[in-house]
């Protein structure tokens, strides 16, 4: 999906609101990943604001009629997904069981990376008090984290940060959607 | 949307480490998974219902060391990081035993030897809670399903592959290769009876068989062994001779 040069083209679009909503709905449905308002506007040749309004109207419409589907804002884009309450019947159909996909060590490492990024392995060790090499390998393999260059310090250690996949898998709009790390302080004592 | 099921033993709700009771004769324990030494330490502090800002270092250190000894006696590899923490605990414990320098001015706040450890524990616990939050989020996310991928030219583009994809593919190729070899062995498997029949036919047809070239025809170790046994069997039971024309030379199987 190319997201080059966003251009707020003519706002006076040829499409009616309902036509625009229909087009947006179709595109969100076919997109494999959350699709950004910018991409939608580019493909449709519409202004970003009118597209944004159309998506939001669509989202509200799904909401109002209590559809089995929902339009969600994830990883900076829009996604069509099933409603959470329906998970049981879906699992029955798909014959899948929910499973913990990450080990405790991997989740801890991921939380350090998510909040401290970009961060090096020694810095993660400092916080967790334990080697995280295998957890990092798992997270890289699952594409939840990516390398973010080297830190300009002795040994030029590799820097790690979270990926777009992380936002998608954890249902986050963006990193600021994470609760503040300081909020966990209250829980501690 | 179906993914290969992956099951890890850990579950935040059900799996926590627990020391069941320390009776005089036996120590019952259920070892959960501690994510690291800080995790174990937090657990011990909580078990003692101690205040994290006022850790009873002597007691906690003893328990920590007990736990490590137990891990060792159960042949669980104790990670080096656990030992580092043990050393740090002992150091703090001994520093706390030292009498305060009476010459030091009263106002001069002498730093609590535990302070650094407390800071680390507090910092760690924040991330532990954040990890729990992430766990809850994935649980929720797993209840939301999206459409499966649509086949297009783009979504199998090579460009989007990472090194890890490459390794995964390579492993698959390796696995497939293995499978193929396994199949081949199966197909070419030949019984001893068949092998004997085979040799008999050839002797009647050609009068003699060169052992060297006969064995060379065999593709697998298993076949070779079968062929060898078949030759021994034929020589024992029937009127054929093994003739070697020169020392270390080829052996010929010949009808008498």
Image (cartoon, coloured by chain):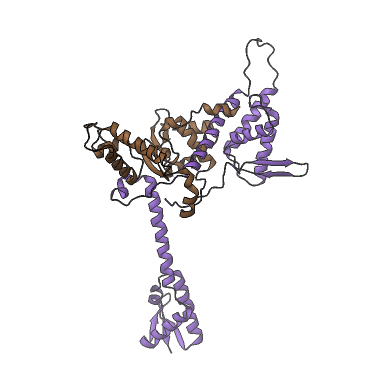
Chain colours: A brown, B purple
Q: Position of residue A182 (x, y in %)?
A: 51, 26
Residue A119 position by quadrant: top left
Q: Nearer the viewer, residue A37 or B35?
A: A37
In this rendering, does residue A118 appear at all?
no
Q: Does residue B84 sit above or below B159 in this rendering?
A: above
Q: Position of residue A88 (x, y in %)?
A: 50, 49
- B83 with respect to B234 (left or right): right
> Furthest-right residue in view?
B24
Residue at 28% x, 33% y is: A50
In this rendering, does residue A69 appear at all?
yes
Q: Position of residue B154 (x, y in %)?
A: 29, 48
Q: Does residue B204 sit above or below B127 in this rendering?
A: below
Residue at 66% x, 30% y is: B90
- A106 with respect to B86 (left or right): left
Q: Does residue A64 sit above or below B151 in this rendering?
A: above
Residue B196 position by quadrant: bottom left
Q: Nearer the viewer, residue B212 or A12?
A: A12
Q: Nearer the viewer, residue B24 or B1?
A: B1
Q: Position of residue A20 (x, y in %)?
A: 28, 39
Residue at 62% x, 43% y is: B32
């Amino acid at each position: 999906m190319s997201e080059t040069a966003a251009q707020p083209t003519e706002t006076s679009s040829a499409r009616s609101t309902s036509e625009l909503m229909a087009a947006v709905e179709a595109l969100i449905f076919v997109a494999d990943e959350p699709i950004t308002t910018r991409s939608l506007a580019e493909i449709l040749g519409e202004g970003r604001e009118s597209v944004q309004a159309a998506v939001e109207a669509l989202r509200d419409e799904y909401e109002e009629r209590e559809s089995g589907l929902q339009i969600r804002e994830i990883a900076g884009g829009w996604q069509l997904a099933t409603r959470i309450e329906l998970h049981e019947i879906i699992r029955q159909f798909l014959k899948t069981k929910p499973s913990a996909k990450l080990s405790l060590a991997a989740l801890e490492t991921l939380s350090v990376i998510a909040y401290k990024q970009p961060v090096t392995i020694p810095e993660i060790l400092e916080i967790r008090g334990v080697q995280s090499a295998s957890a990092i390998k798992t997270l890289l393999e699952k594409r939840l984290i990516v390398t973010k260059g080297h830190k300009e310090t002795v040994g030029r250690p590799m820097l790690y940060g979270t990926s777009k996949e992380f936002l998608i898998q954890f249902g986050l709009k963006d990193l600021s959607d994470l609760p503040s790390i300081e909020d966990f302080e209250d829980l501690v004592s | 949307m179906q993914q290969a099921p992956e099951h890890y033993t850990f579950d935040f709700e059900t799996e926590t480490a627990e020391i069941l009771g320390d009776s005089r004769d036996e120590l019952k324990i259920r070892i959960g998974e501690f994510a690291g030494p800080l995790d174990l330490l937090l657990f011990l502090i909580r078990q003692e219902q101690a205040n994290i800002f006022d850790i009873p270092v002597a007691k906690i250190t003893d328990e920590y060391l007990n736990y490590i000894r137990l891990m060792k006696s159960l042949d669980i590899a104790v990670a080096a990081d656990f030992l580092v923490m043990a050393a740090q605990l002992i150091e703090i414990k001994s520093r706390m035993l030292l009498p305060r320098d009476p010459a030091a001015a009263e106002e001069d706040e002498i730093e609590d030897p535990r302070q650094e450890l407390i800071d680390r524990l507090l910092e760690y616990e924040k991330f532990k809670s954040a990890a729990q939050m992430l766990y809850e989020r994935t649980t929720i996310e797993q209840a939301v399903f999206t459409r499966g991928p649509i086949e297009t030219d783009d979504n199998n583009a090579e460009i989007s592959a990472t090194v890890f994809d490459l390794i995964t593919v390579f492993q698959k190729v390796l696995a497939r290769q293995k499978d193929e070899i396994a199949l081949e062995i199966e197909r070419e498997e030949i019984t001893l009876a068949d092998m004997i029949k085979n040799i008999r036919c050839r002797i009647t047809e050609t009068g003699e068989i060169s052992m060297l070239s006969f064995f060379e025809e065999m593709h697998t170790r298993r076949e070779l062994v079968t062929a060898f046994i078949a030759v021994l069997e034929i020589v024992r039971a029937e009127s054929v001779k093994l003739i070697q024309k020169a020392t270390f030379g080829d052996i010929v199987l010949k009808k008498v």
